[in-house]
Amino acid sequence: MAVATFDYAAWSARYLDLAVNVPANLAALYFEEAQLYLDNTDRSLVCNIGQRTLLLYMLVAHIAYLNLPTTSGGNGAGVVGRVSSATRGSVSIGTDMGAQPGSAEWFLQTQYGAAFWQATLWLRTTRYIHIPRVQRQTWP
């Protein structure tokens, strides 16, 4: 059975900015959670284990960032989308995500989720599989 496994050293080398605030045991839990979003079994649409591991690591980074408090550099404020308006006096900010297809809004909250969303575009497109029609011979 070929599945991706979590290697904290490899993940933390790639996502050093997050690894500072995300210990190995918590990152491993995020990896388990990431498998809810991307199948990590031998029946996964992502057959290449290296690619599947990278995609799962992106999800771990996305989940980690969403769960980090702002004091640790996370998105605890919940600001999502592009800044559409701002005020200085008494500070206010308005954001706009625009109309996004499917579950894009959840992924586009972080740079890691956006990278995952873009990298998995091929999984969300229709795949045409041609099955040749076998015609029986009706003439002797």
Image (cartoon, grey):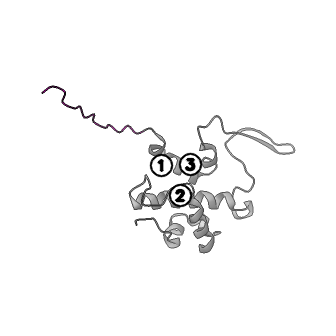
Front residue (pair 95, 45)? 45
Can you see residue 23? no
- Within 10 Å of disc 3 (Cα), the crowding (few <14, some 14-19, many 20+) is some
The alpha-carbon separation of the residues under discs 3 and 2 comes to 9 Å
User: Type of residue at label 3?
Assistant: Ala
What residue is at 59 percent from the left and 43 percent from the top? 104
The alpha-carbon separation of the residues under discs 1 and 3 comes to 8 Å
| Residue under pointer 2 | 58
What residue is at 49 percent from the left and 71 percent from the top? 7
Magenta segment range?
A: 127-140
Q: Secondary structure at mark 2?
A: helix
Q: Which mark is residue 114?
A: 3
| Residue under pointer 1 | 119
Front residue (pair 137, 132)? 137
What residue is at 67 percent from the left and 57 percent from the top? 66
Q: Which mark is residue 1?
A: none
Q: Earlier in the sequence, mark 1 or mark 2?
A: 2
Q: Earlier in the sequence, mark 3 or mark 2?
A: 2
Q: Are marks 1 and 2 in contact (CB under 8 Å)?
A: yes
Q: Outermost residue, front direction?
A: 140
Does 115 sit left or right of 140 as displayed?
right
User: Type of residue at label 2?
Assistant: Met
Verify whether residue 137 appears in magenta. Answer: yes
